[in-house]
Image: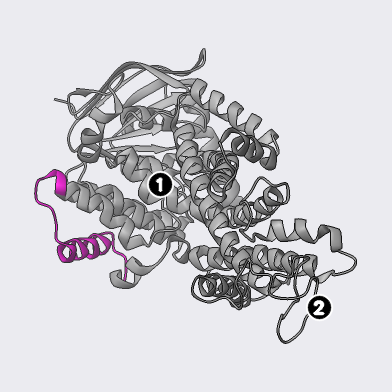
């Protein structure tokens, strides 16, 4: 008797996903690093005519004040990376800690934490971030990063809690307990590695979210104040001239999308190569 | 003195009793079987014996493990007892091993812990050697290769051997085997049973063997306790209980096992 076993939906080879992610993210990282030491023009300098189109002198043109767009885009890469890494790091630190605590907590404390997290998640990320920024004295890049980190931590905590609970009931945890392993040790060697593959993909998603949310905050004037050229601010400034000089909006938009996609591909590829059960089939 | 002495153990979930008034004792080198259908409280009894009941379940009565009261004792105090007094081998070896950790590393954990506890920490090289030796002890071929494998790369029987090696790594006085052969095919079952039998004999451990499989129990242990809905309905030496089951439930268990055997033979 021969049966056909349904195969998993076709999926690009793992290495391709990983490489595509590496190249996209690498491009932004390289640009961001380069912007620290070299820029084509003074970022705030009005170096050209207003709203110039692309040329050899200004590769993607100038904005409505005559500043070089490519220079701003490069600085934007750096800001986006700092915001993404910073917000995810803060969100992960708070979220994973809370989530693990909730997974171990007594029933009522766990319920209380879960309910609090549900309420936090029900609030749009951006709204929480706006509240945090509004509560701090001045809007700065750092207040935006902290705000986004706190907003993201609720989702991380919720995910960590449920993932950790799922690992906690496995026999290998009981086996480790029987052999006299302490809880901190079990968290470090069994729980964190086993929830990491799922968490890391979530972190990548969050990275993209944070970059986009920072752009939104900047767009609303709550992010990094001028003259910081974040992509969100560039989009906001290009708003009025989107029909006459569309490149001013398209360029930062494309940069934003390429970084978000790159990080997701990278995380997907990394997850597959970290998880031995997904390796080399 | 008994190694494990359980008296009047009851386990409740909310208000519902899952195990009621269970008593038995096990001395060094003794082998006891806990028999019963699924849901009769066998596994819970094993967990209660090591103080590892899941949250939400409460135990009352007395469980003395190596003379130490387990019920009501805080976790931290039990950690030291657990590594040395008792170890558990579980039913499903796939979930009993961490899927993301190489087998050798998993096995090294309890070995290193036991060595530290005894006050003679092992050097990395000595630990490696001890780990390979432990793999050889459970009759796994090519230990260095197995040590590098992940659990999903091994067969069910190999995984169960590793789970047994991990349980033995703490050199416990009591080995609790919770349906250790149920998830395995018949040939592998026999191999694992022989292995457990040999190791328990060599190391003079006590064995608490949990199963619903009567022939398996009969060949492995000397005494049995038959559980039904959390209550012990019959207890005694294997030969006696199996030859003259007194309780209706025990009789029906035997009848079911016999019917199953007949059906198997008839089907051949």
Earlier in the chain: of badge 1 and badge 2, it is 2
* Towards the viewer: B96 or A28: A28
Q: How many circles with numbers are drawn on the protein?
A: 2
Residue B242, x across and y down, in percent: 39, 32
Outermost residue, top direction?
B15
Residue B251, percent across and down?
49, 27
Give the chain letter at badge 1: A
The image shows residue A123, relative to residue A156, as above or below, that is above
- Is residue B89 among the parts visible in the rendering? no
Residue A110 visible within the image:
yes
How many residues crowd mark 1 within 10 Å: few (<14), some (14–19), many (20+)? many
Identify the residue position indicated by label 2 in the image.
A53
**Which of the pair B63/A18 is nearer the observer?**
A18
Helix, strand or loop at disc 2? loop
Q: Tell me which segment is drawn in magenta.
A: B116-141
B179 inside magenta stretch: no
Horizontal side, residue A152 vs residue A243: left or right: left
Task: Tell me the number on the disc at residue B251.
Answer: none
What residue is drawn where x is 43% and y is 43%? A171
x and y, in percent, of residue A231 in the image: 68, 61
Q: Residue at x 43, y 47 (%)?
A: A191
- A205 sits to left or right of A33: right
Say which residue label 1 marks. Answer: A172
């Amino acid at each position: 008797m021969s049966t056909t076993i349904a195969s998993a939906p076709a999926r690009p080879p793992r290495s391709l996903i990983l490489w595509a992610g590496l190249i996209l993210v690498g491009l932004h990282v390289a640009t961001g690093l380069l912007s620290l030491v070299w820029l084509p023009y003074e970022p705030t300098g009005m170096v050209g005519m207003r709203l110039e189109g692309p040329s050899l002198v200004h590769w993607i043109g100038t904005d409505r004040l005559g500043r070089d767009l490519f220079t701003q885009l490069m600085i934007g890469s750096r800001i986006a990376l700092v915001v993404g890494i910073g917000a995810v790091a803060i969100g992960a630190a708070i979220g994973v800690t809370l989530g693990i605590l909730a997974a171990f907590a007594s029933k009522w404390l766990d319920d209380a934490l879960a309910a609090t997290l549900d309420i936090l998640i029900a609030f749009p990320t951006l709204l929480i971030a706006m509240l945090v920024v509004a509560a701090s004295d001045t809007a700065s890049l750092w207040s935006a990063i902290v705000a986004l980190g706190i907003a993201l931590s609720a989702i991380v905590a919720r995910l960590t809690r449920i993932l950790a609970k799922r690992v906690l009931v496995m026999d290998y945890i009981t086996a480790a307990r029987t052999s006299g392993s302490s809880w901190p040790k079990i968290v470090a060697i069994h729980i964190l590695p086993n929830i990491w593959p799922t968490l890391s993909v979530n972190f990548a998603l969050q990275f993209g979210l944070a970059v986009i949310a920072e752009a939104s905050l900047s767009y609303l004037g709550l992010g990094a104040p001028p003259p910081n050229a974040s992509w969100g601010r560039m989009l906001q400034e290009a708003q009025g001239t989107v029909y006459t000089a569309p490149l001013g909006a398209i360029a930062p938009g494309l940069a934003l999308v390429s970084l978000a996609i790159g990080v997701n591909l990278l995380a997907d590829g990394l997850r597959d190569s970290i998880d031995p059960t997904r390796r080399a089939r | 003195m008994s190694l494990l002495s359980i008296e009047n153990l009851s386990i409740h979930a909310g208000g519902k009793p899952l195990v009621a008034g269970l008593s038995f004792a096990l001395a060094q080198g003794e082998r006891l079987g806990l028999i019963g259908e699924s849901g009769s409280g066998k596994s819970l009894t094993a967990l209660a014996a090591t103080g590892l009941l899941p949250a939400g379940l409460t135990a009352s009565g007395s469980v003395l493990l190596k003379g130490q009261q387990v019920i009501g004792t805080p976790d931290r105090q039990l950690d030291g007892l657990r590594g040395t007094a008792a170890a558990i081998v579980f039913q499903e070896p796939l979930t009993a091993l961490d899927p993301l950790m190489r087998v050798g590393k998993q096995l090294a954990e309890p070995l290193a812990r036991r060595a530290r506890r005894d006050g003679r920490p092992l050097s990395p090289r000595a630990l490696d050697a001890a780990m390979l030796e432990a793999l050889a002890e459970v009759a796994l071929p090519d230990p260095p290769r197995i040590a590098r494998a992940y659990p999903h790369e091994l067969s069910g029987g190999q995984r169960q051997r590793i789970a047994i090696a991990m349980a033995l790594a703490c050199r416990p006085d009591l080995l609790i085997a919770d349906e250790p052969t149920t998830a395995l095919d018949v040939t592998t079952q026999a191999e694992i049973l022989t292995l457990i039998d040999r190791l328990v004999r060599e190391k003079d451990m006590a064995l608490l063997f949990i199963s619903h499989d009567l022939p398996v129990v009969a060949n492995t242990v000397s005494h049995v306790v038959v559980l039904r809905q959390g209550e012990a309905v019959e207890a005694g030496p294997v030969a006696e209980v199996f030859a003259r089951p007194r309780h209706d439930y025990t009789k029906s268990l035997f009848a079911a096992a016999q019917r199953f055997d007949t059906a198997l033979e008839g089907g051949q």
